[in-house]
């Protein structure tokens, strides 16, 4: 369990470093790459009200993916209420690699308010 937390932390830290130059933008979500590979990602829009209020942070969405790679359902696992709907709308458009069974995984989005 400790390794899994460390792996998630390292993935999140890497994503922050990669995307830190894009202030005021929503970042493309990330997943635990040991699970289903994402074939098509759609970036989340940064809701206008959240941007004007300088709301940022992480949003976690639990995603159920069908065998053929379509998103079957989503559930908010955490994040600011002004940001979660935009993330759910984006991740519902994602396509994953096919697998032998339906899977569930967490997708994280990160928003950085502009300065």
Image: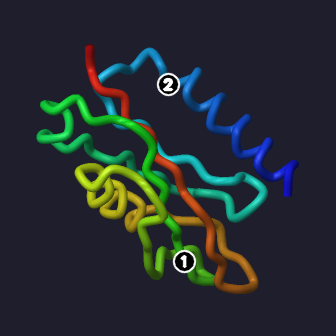
Callout 2 crowding tier (Cα within 10 Å): few <14, some 14–19, many ≥20 = some
Q: Which mark is residue 64?
A: 1
Q: Residue at x 44, y 39 (%)?
A: 110
Q: Residue at x 35, y 55 (%)?
A: 87
Q: How far across and down, in percent of the image, does residue 70 sit?
A: 50, 75
Q: Give the secondary structure at mark 1.
A: strand
Instruction: Give the CA separation, mark 2 to mark 1.
Output: 26 Å
The colour scheme used here is rainbow
Q: Residue at x 26, y 13 (%)?
A: 115
Callout 1 crowding tier (Cα within 10 Å): few <14, some 14–19, many ≥20 = some
Q: How far across and down, in percent of the image, does residue 103 sit?
A: 66, 78
Q: Earlier in the sequence, mark 2 or mark 1?
A: 2
Q: Is residue 102 above or below residue 111?
A: below
Q: Give the secondary structure at mark 2.
A: helix
Q: How far across and down, in percent of the image, does residue 33 sit?
A: 72, 52
User: Which quarter of the figure is the N terminus placed in?
Assistant: bottom right
Place residue 86 in its image quadrant.
bottom left
Q: Residue at x 43, y 50 (%)?
A: 59
Q: Is residue 75 above or below residue 24?
A: below
Q: Which mark is residue 81?
A: none
Q: Mark 2 highlights which residue?
A: 19
Asked whether, in this view, residue 106 is left or right of residue 76, the answer is right
Please give the count of numbered marks on the rendered protein. 2
Place residue 34 in its image quadrant.
bottom right
Q: Are marks 2 and 1 in contact (CB under 8 Å)?
A: no
Q: Nearer the viewer, residue 18 or 12?
A: 12
Asked whether, in this view, residue 74 is left or right of residue 69, the answer is left
Place residue 56 in its image quadrant.
top left
């Amino acid at each position: 369990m400790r390794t899994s937390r460390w792996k998630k932390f390292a993935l999140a830290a890497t994503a922050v470093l990669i995307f830190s130059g894009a202030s005021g933008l929503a970042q493309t979500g990330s997943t635990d790459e040991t699970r289903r590979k994402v074939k098509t990602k759609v970036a989340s829009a940064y809701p206008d009200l959240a941007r004007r209020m300088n709301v940022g942070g992480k949003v976690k969405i639990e995603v159920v993916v069908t065998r053929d790679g379509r998103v079957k359902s989503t559930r908010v696992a955490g994040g600011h209420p002004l940001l979660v709907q935009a993330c759910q709308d984006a991740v519902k458009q994602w396509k994953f690699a096919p697998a032998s069974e339906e899977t569930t995984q967490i997708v994280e989005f990160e928003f950085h308010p502009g300065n």
